[in-house]
Amino acid sequence: MFGCHVEPPPKMPVSESWLEVTDAAYAKAHASYVKRTALPFEFLREGVDGTQLVIQFLGMAEAKGGAYASNLAIVVQMTHGGAPIECVSKIVLEGTPASPSAAAANDPDSDAIGSTTIRPWHPDLVTADVDDHDYKCERHATPVAFVNTGGGDAMEAEYNADQKRVFQINTPLDPHIVTADWEDRCELVTQHREVKRYEHFVAAHFQPPEWDKLSPIFASKKLVELPPECHAVVATGKPFQRIEADIGYVPLGPQVHTKPMPRRNNTIPDLGMYIQRARLMGM
């Protein structure tokens, strides 16, 4: 046995974070400077897990000193109707009012077209059978044994009435101490399921991030993914898929960090299979 109390297995490979996803006004007011940053990735037929991308992106930004992330978005480029387009899915805090441009673009009777010369395309929600990738995290215990070389319990003593002396009773402790080294191990497990998802995500084999699981880690409120806004772009060759945000940086120091140290484990599945560049890009 390793003890009578065992923590429940984690649901995500990260439990909390220094970096906080917030609104642009708050980030600008509290950061020394803000920089638009992106993490490019590629689509694979085997699928891409958006939750994993968000963890990797925000984790890399945090490691470089980022304290706030605002204007978070998933940007997908593809061809629709023979023309290159870009679809942007913005992520906001629950209760954030819609911007006037977004409201106009989502109005079917509106002529608002932003910077494009064609009417924006709005992907439909469709029902489809997909192969998603879910995190499966388990807590594993590795037995650790060591030999106790102590000299016994010094608190145990016996009074000898004849000699009027106190003699220490050297009661050896169990020389073999067994404890456990706990480690969280996470992996992505393929699950076949029926989902309701935007059609461009289904076509790209992209699993949207699970914001209900990410919100408690990275935000003070629930994070909500808005309907995608798609517009025409100039063809530049290879499509540029990315997750991006305005990362706010603050001076290092104890007065800045008020959260407890984040508990991370080192078993986050490798993202190298679909990240184009193993670094963040300033935009």
Image: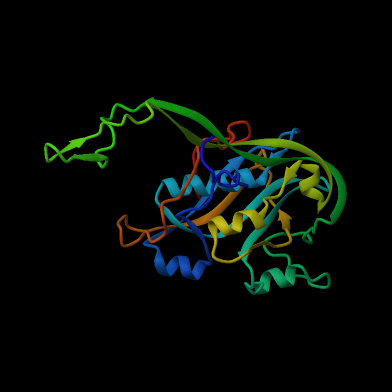
The x and y percentages for residue 98 are: 67, 72
Q: Residue at x 45, y 28 (%)?
A: 144
Figure quadrant of the N terminus: top right
Horizontal side of residue 278 vs 200, given as left or right:
left
Quadrant of the image occupied by residue 228: bottom right
Q: Residue at x 49, y 44 (%)?
A: 264
Color scheme of the displayed model: rainbow
Q: Please, is residue 161 above or below residue 69 in the view?
A: above
The foreground one among 123 and 63 is 63
Q: Residue at x 61, y 54 (%)?
A: 214
The x and y percentages for residue 92 are: 62, 64
Horizontal side of residue 132 vs 1, given as left or right:
right
Horizontal side of residue 198 vs 212, given as left or right:
right
Quadrant of the image occupied by residue 193: top right
Quadrant of the image occupied by residue 254: bottom left
Q: Is residue 83 visible?
A: no
Q: Is residue 166 visible?
A: yes
Question: How many marks overall?
Answer: 0
The x and y percentages for residue 124 are: 84, 56
Horizontal side of residue 163 vs 142, given as left or right:
left
The x and y percentages for residue 63 are: 43, 45
The foreground one among 41 and 80 is 41
Q: Please, is residue 270 above or below residue 104 in the view?
A: above
The foreground one among 104 and 33 is 33
